[in-house]
Image (cartoon, helix red, strand yellow):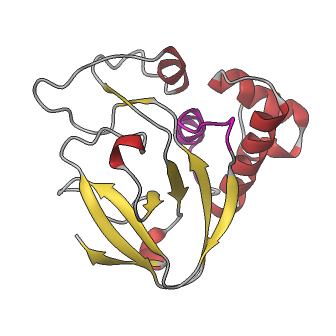
Amino acid sequence: MTLSLHDHLSEAGVDKWIAEIGCTNAPIPRENIKTALAFFSRDMPRLPIDQAVGFLAAMDLSRPVREVTLRPGDRLLGFRTESESPFKLFFARRGASAEQSGINTARRGPVHFVVRQEVRALESFTTGAKDFWTAMVPGQALGFAIRALRAQRSEDREFAAIVMGGGQQLIVPESYSSLLVEQR
């Protein structure tokens, strides 16, 4: 089965994504997958398919997924480690909880941003996930989630943190061109 970011254009295409990420085949998740894929295909056309699968698997597809326009002066947060660029893809609105952001909070702190020019973003809610991309700290509890494990093709990875979700997140493509760091 070959996936494409343009699969939002057909019901058969959406069926492939439902099967790949293992979510419920119901009207709301289907519509949310279409919304996310339309955003990815238009605003992130070079997004690798495996990353798109991981992004969708980490979204709560039973809750709203929508495109929003961020305006100059809007304030955002990014939860970053000291060694990573502040300008990544995932952000939250000010006041969001790091613990509900769908990431391992170990060694992460808030970076405050202000929107400097209008930009489209994809807004969704996070779900629990298996975080492989953040280094764990000694003594941190391990776990695994079948849905996240399958969707992220992680059978070759042994250790990861299970993280909580439930918070809102924003995907902001090429954030370096539309956001300004206020405080790190």
Q: Horizontal and vertical percent for residue 119? A: 59, 75
Q: Describe residue 155's horizontal placement relative to residue 20 as left or right.
A: left
Residue 8 in the magenta stretch? The answer is: no
- Image point (79%, 37%), residue name: 28
Give the quadrant of residue 23: top right
Give 110 or 150, whichever is nearer the viewer: 110
Residue 58 in the magenta stretch? The answer is: yes
Q: Horizontal and vertical percent for residue 25? A: 79, 24
- Image point (51%, 53%), residue name: 169
Give the quadrant of residue 63: top right
Question: 182 above or below 110?
Answer: below
- Image point (66%, 24%), residue name: 20
Q: Horizontal and vertical percent for residue 160? A: 30, 25
Give 82 or 45, whichever is nearer the viewer: 82
Q: Residues in magenta? A: 47-63
Residue, far left: 138
Q: Describe residue 71's horizontal placement relative to residue 29 as left or right.
A: left
Q: Horizontal and vertical percent for residue 102? A: 42, 39
Q: Considering the image in quadrants, where does the N terminus appear?
A: top right
Question: 130 above or below 144?
Answer: below
- Image point (38%, 64%), residue name: 77
Give 172 or 113, whichever is nearer the viewer: 113
Q: Describe residue 7's horizontal placement relative to residue 91 as left or right.
A: right
Q: Is residue 125 visible?
A: yes
Q: Is residue 1 visible?
A: no
